Amino acid sequence: MDATAVAHVRRFNRTVTQRLGVLEETYLSRARPIGQARVLWEIGPDGADVRTLRARLDLDSGYLSRLLRALEADGLVVVEPGVPDRRVRTARLTARGLAERSELDRRSDELAAGLLAPLDAGQWERLAAAMAEVERLLTASTVTVAETDPRRPEARAALAAYAAELDERFDAGFDPARSIPAGAADLTPPAGLLVVATLHGEPVGCGALRFHGGAPAEIKRMWVARSARGLGLGRRLLTELEARAREHGVRVLHLETNRTLTEAIGLYRSAGYREVPAFNDEAYAHHWFEKLL
């Protein structure tokens, strides 16, 4: 890791935490730390199940429980069994909690206005653009990519979203029964593997490999959720699959794609894949690619 880049990140963190008042024992002068304030905001007026809160905030379950207990003790939150699944606890704001959240929102707006006040309009635009870029990059760094059993819920959700998007985008829709199979058995070692990208516990991308002994391996089921595009996740998934293919002794990779997936075609070409004659009879393919590893 580049030492200069690390130093830049640490200096940025120090500046932001000081400017936003995170160093204070209380946040926005409301007699509670920023962690409790953030949990109040995330619960929101409609409530939220505790499992979702934990994933959304990337918090340890024990620490989140302590935050919720403190908010309950202050009469701001109630935590109760969910409906219909009582095993899933749900956190809801009381009337006092809703009022406190509203006050925190008002003070947060004042803090943001105070940050902007010393700057002119041109500086506002530069700051907004820089913040948007920082948010994108920090979100990208939060995404995890891991090899996953295709039978797991997050894998099934990702593969279902992949099929649904193809059905929406392809001119004649997408029927998995007409496509070359890539079922759970095909994506389980030693026949193949599946990697799933998750963000705050939710699947936002996937990609797969199918192995064929000494023949070229195939890249299958490449998908990135619309909500995660612009984070470089497609390239990250492709790089991950190539690395895993090398680990399995693969020297040549094949993939095919549909002409409507222009962003995927651009990604493959920029990553060194060259277009070759058709090497299979995939019903939905218009372009076939190959890469030597």
Image (cartoon, rainbow, N blue to C red):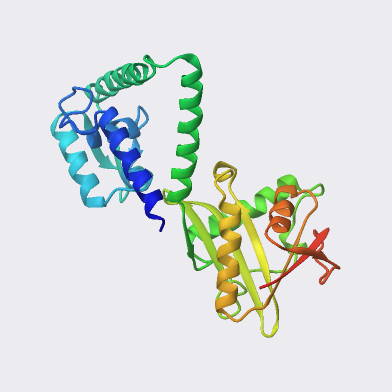
Quadrant where the image shows the C terminus: bottom right
> Which x, y percent locates residue 209?
62, 70
Report which quarter residue 20 is drawn in: top left
Q: Tell me if 74 is positioned left or right of 50 in this view.
A: left
Q: Tell me if 107 is positioned left or right of 263 in this view.
A: left
Of all residues, the one furthest to the front in this rendering is: 4
- Image vertical order of residue 22 relative to residue 280, above or below: above
Q: Nearer the viewer, residue 53 or 254?
A: 254
Of all residues, the one furthest to the bottom in this rendering is: 214
- Image vertical order of residue 157 relative to residue 212, above or below: above
- Image vertical order of residue 244 relative to residue 275, above or below: below
Q: Nearer the viewer, residue 210 or 124?
A: 124
Q: Nearer the viewer, residue 72 or 103?
A: 103
> Which x, y percent locates residue 27?
21, 28
Report which quarter residue 177 is drawn in: bottom right
Q: Tell me if 203 is positioned left or right of 37 in this view.
A: right
Q: What residue is at 28 percent from the left and 34 percent from the top?
A: 17
Of all residues, the one furthest to the right in this rendering is: 277
> Which x, y percent locates residue 145?
48, 59
Q: How many marks?
A: 0
Quadrant where the image shows the N terminus: bottom left
Q: What residue is at 69 percent from the left and 85 percent from the top?
A: 214
> Which x, y percent locates residue 253?
69, 72
Report which quarter residue 272 is drawn in: bottom right
Q: What residue is at 55 percent from the left and 64 percent from the top?
A: 240
Q: What residue is at 78 percent from the left and 55 percent from the top?
A: 258
- Image vertical order of residue 56 relative to residue 217, above or below: above
